[in-house]
Amino acid sequence: MNVKQFVKQHRDDWKELEQLVTKLHKKRRKLTAYEIDQFHRLYQKAAQHLSYSQTYFQGEDVTAYLNGIVSKSHNLLYKDQLSSMKQLRHFFSTKFIGLLMEQWKFVLVAMLLFAAGGLASFISVVNDPIHLYSVIPTEMAQGVDPDQLGSNNESVDSSFMSAYIMTNNIQVAILAFAGGVTFGILTVYLMIYNGIMVGALAALFWNSGKSYEFWAYIVPHGMIELTAIFIAGGAGLLMGYKLFVPGQFSRGYQLKVQAKRSIQLLLGTIPLFIIAGVIEGFITPASLTLEMKYLVAIITVVGLIVYLIVGNQYLRKNQSIASPGS
């Protein structure tokens, strides 16, 4: 793509952003939710175009022009108009949902990789329990006693197992998105291996007739943790895919853009891990019936679904408002 083609392809977006900057300066007031969404979208696109122009069209007039409009937009958006709370609210109500909806296929792939690993290890350990020691760490295998789980809700073994899984899942989430720089290979490995570990434990308790008790200790916090892991894994897979198939852009450019995108998705999972940690600390070791623990799991799943549905409707509403003027 030469400079003329680049300008022709994107100049309408730049002109719209420039008009919006002028309009917002004249209003001299804080941005509405709709204005934040529209302005933020155009600003992000212009920033990406500037990065590309600086790489391939250094010294050209278009680079200086983009640098000016991006600088003005940045000052307006992040310094003059938006409070930190408004930025935070916008991120979780619009930006994070938008990124998640755009890459849902990669999140689904991450979930399927996890499920494949879990199913394979479950079948393996069910058929031969000794395989447990070949697929999960020895200290974890030795710290799990199916006969104690369920007979004592404050069992040391069950607490150890849940804490180990939670710590492991947080580490996996961080590594899963970072694994995108390996063309997604590390991300694929982590998704499969994490599934293998959970599947092996599930098989151990299945063989002991304790599956109902096992899942009662896992799902209250596990549903949220696994959702966060799948999102992080999807971010890593998306980055890896863009590096493997960069399209018309260079791999360096795709790495810069997709890394920023993936970090935003990872940041969006932080509240999920916080909620999971609260459940882990107060629900898992509590002297509650197993049915109550399953109820907590159902509530967390319903909460996630409601958040996604409401967030997606809000996003679509803003996009429908923005489309006539685009």
Image (cartoon, grey):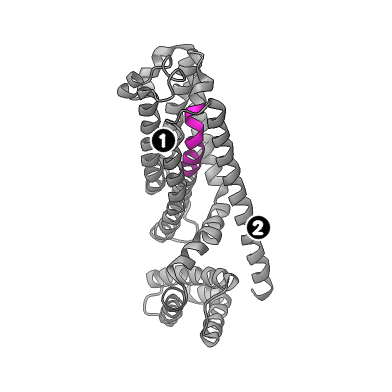
In this view of the protein, can residue 324 be seen by the observer? Answer: yes
| Quadrant in which the C terminus appears | bottom right
Q: Is residue 84 above or below residue 8?
A: above
Percent across and percent down for residue 62 are: 45, 80
Q: Which residue is mark 1?
A: 189
Q: Local crowd at mark 2 within 10 Å, few (<14), some, or many (≥20)?
A: some
> Residue drawn at (47%, 70%), measured in percent from left and top?
49
Answer with the quarter of the image where residue 51 lies.
bottom left
Q: How many numbered marks have been drawn onto this rendered protein structure?
A: 2
Percent across and percent down for residue 299 are: 58, 40
Question: Residues under labels 2 and 1: Cα distance?
Answer: 34 Å
Amino acid marked by disc 1: Tyr
Taking the magenta stretch, the answer to whether it contains residue 11 is no
Please provide the residue range marked out in magenta.
216-230
Q: Which residue is mark 2?
A: 313
Q: In the image as oriented, which residue stretches furthest toward the left? A: 139
Query: Which numbered dot is residue 101?
Result: none
Amino acid marked by disc 2: Gln
> Residue drawn at (61%, 61%), measured in percent from left and top?
315
